[in-house]
Structure formats: structure tokens, C-alpha cells
Image (cartoon, grey):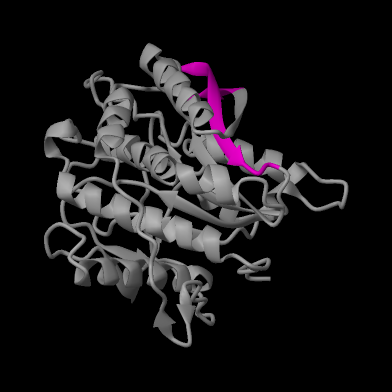
Amino acid sequence: MKVFIQTRLFVLACFFLLHANGQLQALQVFPDDNAHFNKTLANILQPRVVGSTGHTNVRKFIVSELNSLGFTTEIDSFSQKVPIFGNVTFSNIVGVINPKANDFLALACHYDSKYFPNDPNFVGATDSAVPCAMMLNTAKTLQPYLQKDFKNRQDLGLMLIFFDGEEAFREWTNDDSVYGSKHLAKKYSNTKLKSNIRHIDRIEVLVLLDLLGAPNPKFYSFYGNTDGLHRSLSDIERQLAKQKMLEGNNLMFMNRPAQGFVDDDHRPFLQENVPILHIIPNPFPKVWHTPNDNVANLHWPTMHNFNKIFRTFVYEYLQRHRERINLRYF
């Protein structure tokens, strides 16, 4: 899964959403809700291979959380034949605020866990229970803004996507991987509005979270057209650190390009020219795809810092959005 593939990176002009005259403006920092984060993570942190009882339980929990947070929720279910298991049913979960908006900021992760025949108790903490909990916690901590000032805007909506079937059942290939994102990207590409605009083209940027929760991660910029957004995350982190609002001294967001491409759920959307901000550490966590990818090996200060940085980034994107942003390559 998620093998690095060397490729030439695009070099385009950077887009700095949060800057004015080259300076980062004052940030609105929302309070932590670590109790919600801990409870949310505990509900997701269970074996959840597609088709299992745990998978069903987690799907129902995510839907319930989205509904309680004021999102309009859609379940994108489909059946497909896969290696080892035969025919299985996948269910992408999409929560939306302002579903009739012209454009969307989309946050995404996958909620299924990988199948290991010799490890039925594999819980995939970083991969990807933590990212799921982080997205829901972002919505919870921003709820006062989302449900009051942001709600009913016509220019912009917020979309939370929980992909199903990211993991390979046998071996990571183009066919045996990212089942849910392939289906959803195709569905959104084939769905057109009355104005003849494809639904997928309403996504201004897809922010994909993966492999989060291990200590001292390093995040690099994978795509030139979203490099400005990556730099905004870096600037937010540095400003919060300067204000002593973060735990420890390790910085996560590096102002440097990644040296390659990581295959992940964004691939089908990237192929449809959706701008991608891929937040995944390089190198991967040491516990990746091992029995040690569990709660005991998570690093809580890192997760708390990430939550604070990420919710600030999401708020700043939504709050400062004044006109349609086109970061597409062509």
C-alpha cells in the first residue's frame, strides 16, 4: 500500500491562501476538545475489515457523529468482486455542510482497516483510525462557526469524505486498492448539475489525511498547485509554536517538496484534475502494517498539535474564502 513512486513534480506558482502582503495574518484559534477526540478514536479503533462487524459498527458511528454535528450525510454503497473475499459491499461516507454551494473544501481519509489473515485483531491506529478521529474532531471543535457563520453560504461548502476499501486485500496494485475512492470519483465525474458542471469539479481541493499519530512525522509538499496551502500549514504551525500553544519542539510541516508520489485514495481524483493536498508522513511510521500499529504506540502530543494546526487551517480556508479558487493544472 502507498508505495513511493519517483516522478517529476510540477513546478507552478505557489498559492498562499492565508497571506496578505507576504505576512501571515492573525489566527483565530479554537479550543481543543481532547475528550471528544479520545472518545471518537476509541470508537473507531477496532478491526474494521470490509464486511466485518467492526466495519459496520465504525460506519454507523461515523454517520451518527456527522449527523450530530449538523452534516447532511450520504452513503455511497456498491458491491464489487475482490481478491480472497469474493463479492463484498463497500460504503463510502460523505458528510456535507452547504450541499448546494458552488464549490467545496473536501477533507478525506479512509476508515477500513487492512486484512491480515494471521492478525485478525489489527486495528490500524495510524492507518487510518487517527485521521478519521481527527476529521470528526475538526468538525466538532469548529461546530460553533460551521453551524452559525458558515452554514448556508452559497459560495463554499465543507465536505468530509470517509473512503471505504482503500486497503489491498492481497497485494497493492492499481486494481487491488482504493476501491471506494475510484467509485466515488467516477460517480462524481458522471454527476452533472443543471449548469452542466460535473460534481467533481466543484471540489476546490481534496485534503487527504493518512498514516497520522506516530511521533515526529514530517510532511512535505507533493503538488506544486497546492504548495501554497502546504506552506500555510507550515506557517500556522510556526506561529502557534511561537505563541507556545503547541507541545514539544518538533515541527511537522516542512517547506520542501516531496521526492516522489505516494499512491493513495487521492489517485482517482487526481486523474480527474482535482487539486490534492496530501498530508502523509515521509518516512511512513515504523509501525505501518505491523501489529504494533495500535493505541499503545500513538504519540498524544503530536496528535494534539496536529489537531490544533489542522482545525486552524480549515477555519482560515473557509473564513477567508471570498471567491472561487482554481488550482487545477489545466
* Residue closest to the far bottom: 21
Residue 18 is left or right of residue 303, and the answer is: right
Count of numbered circles in the view: 0
Q: What percent of the width, then of the height, locates residue 292?
A: 15, 34
- Quarter of the image that includes the N terminus: top left
Q: Position of residue 248 (x, y in %)?
A: 11, 60
The residue lying toward the viewer, choosing from 140 and 1, is: 140
Taking the spot 45% from the left edge, 50% from the top edge, the residue there is: 208
Q: Quadrant of the C terminus?
A: bottom right
| 187 or 62, nearer to the observer | 62
Observer able to see residue 197: yes
Q: Position of residue 79 (x, y in %)?
A: 60, 21
In-image side of 164 versus 252 (left or right): right
Find the residue positioned furthest to the top. 53
Residue at coordinates 69% horizontally, 57% vertically from top-left?
A: 155
Span shown in magenta: 79-99
Q: Residue at x 33, y 26 (%)?
A: 44
Q: Find residue 310 and report its image quarter.
A: bottom left
Q: Is residue 263 above or below residue 316?
A: above
Q: Main secondary structure of the magenta part?
A: strand
Instruction: Give the quarter of the image for residue 74.
Output: top right
Instruction: Locate residue 54 relative to residue 273 in the image: left or right.
Output: left
The x, y position of residue 119, in whole percent, is 22, 22
Task: Report the residue at 17% width, 32% height from top.
Answer: 295
Image check: 121 left or right of 132? Answer: left
Q: Is residue 158 above or below residue 94?
A: below
Q: Is residue 287 magenta?
A: no
